[in-house]
Image (cartoon, grey):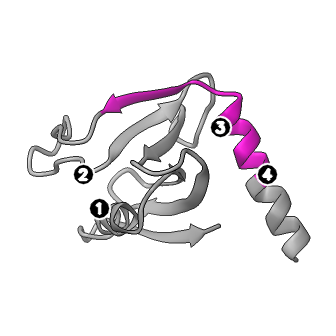
Amino acid sequence: MNGFDDAFWKMLDSLVRDSEIVIDRPKGTVHPKYPDFVYEVDYGYLKDTSSMDGAGIDVWVGSGEKRVDAVMCTVDCLKRDSEIKILIGCTEEEKLSIYRAHNDTQYMKGIMIRR
């Protein structure tokens, strides 16, 4: 299956390379609906793409080399949806922060798939 795995990551590379990254929630800002949540890593989306919620595909953009290095697969029981979020250039510390952000409540859980 490794050939399929490689093709998946190359497809994500292509999608990210050919898309504009919009950071609408920079590191240090507060979530618009949940004032106790502060973004520890830049968060945004790929312009002119679509995800399960009808908005652009979500991305976390870290401080490292700008390459796709993981995805988060999430399930949100409040919104009753699931999504993937692409991690780009995230350090191990940033990945841990993102992982915790998607698992610290009883309503959302996520798994991280590393490249």
Looking at the picture, how far across and down is residue 26, in whole percent? 28, 35
Residue at left 58%, top 59%?
69
Q: State the CA–CA distance, disc 1 to disc 3.
A: 22 Å
Disc 3 target residue: 16
Of discs 1 and 2, which sits in the foreground? Answer: 2
Indicate the amino acid at tag 1: Ala
Indicate the amino acid at tag 4: Lys
Disc 1 target residue: 101
- Closer to the chain start, of discs 1 and 2, is 2
- Closer to the chain start, of discs 1 and 3, is 3
Callout 1 touching callout 2 (CB < 8 Å): yes
Residue at left 15%, top 40%?
30
Mark 1 Cα shell of 10 Å, populated few (<14), some (14-19), many (≥20): some
Callout 1 touching callout 4 (CB < 8 Å): no
Disc 4 target residue: 10
- Closer to the chain start, of discs 1 and 4, is 4
Looking at the picture, how far across and down is residue 100, in whole percent? 30, 68
Residue at left 41%, top 68%?
92
Given residues 21 and 74, the one toward you in this image is 21
Of discs 1 and 4, which sits in the foreground? Answer: 4
- Extreme left residue here? 36
Image-based side of 112 in relation to 115, left or right:
left
Compared with 109, 59 (above or below) is above
Given residues 95 and 75, the one toward you in this image is 95
Given residues 106 and 67, the one toward you in this image is 67
Mark 2 Cα shell of 10 Å, populated few (<14), some (14-19), many (≥20): some
Indicate the amino acid at tag 2: Glu
**Label 2's element?**
loop
Q: State the CA–CA distance, disc 3 to disc 2.
A: 21 Å
Residue range of the region highlighted in magenta in the rendering: 10-25
Q: State the CA–CA distance, disc 1 to disc 2.
A: 9 Å
Disc 2 target residue: 40
